[in-house]
Image (cartoon, grey):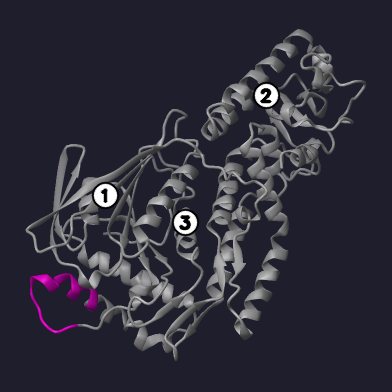
Amino acid sequence: MTISGMTMSNHGSKDQELIIATWGAPWVWRKTKYVLHEEGVSESVESCSSVFALAKKHKNAKVIIVGADSLLDYEQRQNGRGDDQICRDIFYEVADKLGIEPLSKSMEKYSSYEEIILDAKKLISETAKRMSPEGLMLNNMEAIIMPMLGKPSEVTFNGGPRDPFSVLLFELFKITKDSSFGKIYLDLSQGVNYMPSLLLQAAKMLASLSLFDPSIDTKDVVEIKAFNSEPARKLSEIALHEIYWENVGTIQVPLGLGDSREIKVLDRRIEIKGDDGEKAVDSLKKFNEKYDKIKGSVSKVLKSLRYPVPLLLRYSCSTIEDYREFLNALDDAFSLWKENTVINSDGKRIERRLELNYWGLYSYSLSYKACSQIKDSVRQNADGSTKPQNSNDVIMYLDEFDKKIARKIYRRVSRAFEPIITNEVSNIDKKIEEKGEVLNKGECLELDELFEKEGDSEEKGSSASKGTREPDRRIVIAHAGLQREYVEVCREKGGGRIYLRYIADSPERILKILE
């Protein structure tokens, strides 16, 4: 078995597989024969965990095991040996080897919540290694630790109700962000509390984000299968059944574009008071000040994805220096959340002062994925930098609209978006063939001039030119964000490629009407 802290950095094929399993309380498991039934084929393995049956069937799949911080709040070792206690003994032996005592008796040794998370990850990783059947390897296995709520044993875990799902979603995204998985298998058998249900929902959102990957063909989908075992009674074998299946073929874009909850990644917990509460509020204020501009960029990207407006999406992505800043903001939010988690050893409590927001985390992740795909052909400025100085520096080549953007991104948001974009590009292309000789001279033409005020009466305007009329929401959407008096068409010098760009402050004016 190989355990690695490194994430997979290369874009894989659409056939890459991912296994995610939830682990709750390994010290109560029994070693048994798990039999996986999938698509008429059975695979069996004798082990402490059902995940090994999935791993045996899908030998090349990457494996992620999801545990909880309450894993450290495990029960004391009980006397006795026997077949029923093999798994329990493995767990305790690993804990002893790592020097990890039950949390209720060792809280004072932890100076930060981060240390608790690291110990929980070590405990899962080493336990999985010891429980692995001979000859079976888990590829690039990584552990994720969710925050627990309530009092499962001796320690009380107090925090925001959105924290468990938020942490799970963010950690899954960090591990998989630069890889593409066409198949995701979920083992929900051995999770506790809310872990299985949250994993299923997180997998759907993860699949949505995976659809941005260029290695996944436009006709393909991300397949999700969820498995659950029969009740763990004293049986000679336990069946592992496929209980849920779904093909995810649509990128999920948050609907309420004006809702701040969809772009806010971190918030305070109102009930927290005292010095720790004030410290949390101060740190949150500094975080919001630091990332206020990025929050604005996220809002623009969401609007540009919700409607078929490719050039506007490129502009929105250009409003930050580097698309990786979206991920940096999430990293900082997660770090701040952990820093404001207090360990109260006297009261045997873990108190989280801030609360993460999964919709905000998803929106930032969505922006990261979208902008990582659309950034490639942003034209360099004269000084060699790629950050545009104004909207005129943001361009999109005409041939990108159809093959790269319409098919690879917008078709996956809505099947209706692709024909809107391709039809508009086709109309522009035809006009260029008819009367585009001026472009060959190195000049740019306003689309209104190219079409000579043809089309809808709303588009004709009166004597408006160069964006003097307010953008029209209907026209913007119907014409793929290319309302004609707001866009120029140009050709690169020397008879090069044709590209489009917005005029002056047009992008901001258009974004405003898409509220």
Image position, residue 295 (x, y; %): 68, 55
Q: Is residue 87 magenta?
A: yes
Q: Residue at x 22, y 55 (%)?
A: 52
Residue 87 falls left or right of residue 403: left
Q: In front of the other: label 2 or label 3?
A: 3
- The quarter of the rendered structure image containing the N terminus is bottom left
Predominant SS along the magenta part: helix
Name the amino acid, label 2.
Answer: Leu
Residue placed under numbered mark 2 in the picture: 398
Residue placed under numbered mark 3 in the picture: 169
| Location of residue 131 (image quadrant) | bottom left
Is 489 situated above or below 60? above
Q: Give, as a single range, the part of the protein colored magenta.
A: 78-92
Query: Dot 1 lies on which element?
Result: strand
**Disc 2 from disc 3: Cα separation:** 36 Å
Name the amino acid, label 3.
Answer: Leu
How many neighbours does mark 3 have within 10 angstroms: few (below 14), some (14-19), or many (20 or more)? many
Image position, residue 357 (x, y; %): 55, 60
Query: Dot 2 lies on which element?
Result: helix
Closer to the N terminus: mark 2 or mark 3?
3
Q: In front of the other: label 1 or label 2?
A: 1
| Location of residue 398 (image quadrant) | top right
| Between 157 and 430, the one nearer to me in the picture | 157
Image position, residue 181 (x, y; %): 40, 43
Q: Residue furthest right?
A: 463
* One can see residue 142 in this view: no
| Location of residue 248 (image quadrant) | top left
Q: Residue at x 25, y 83 (%)?
A: 76
Residue 127 falls left or right of residue 208: left
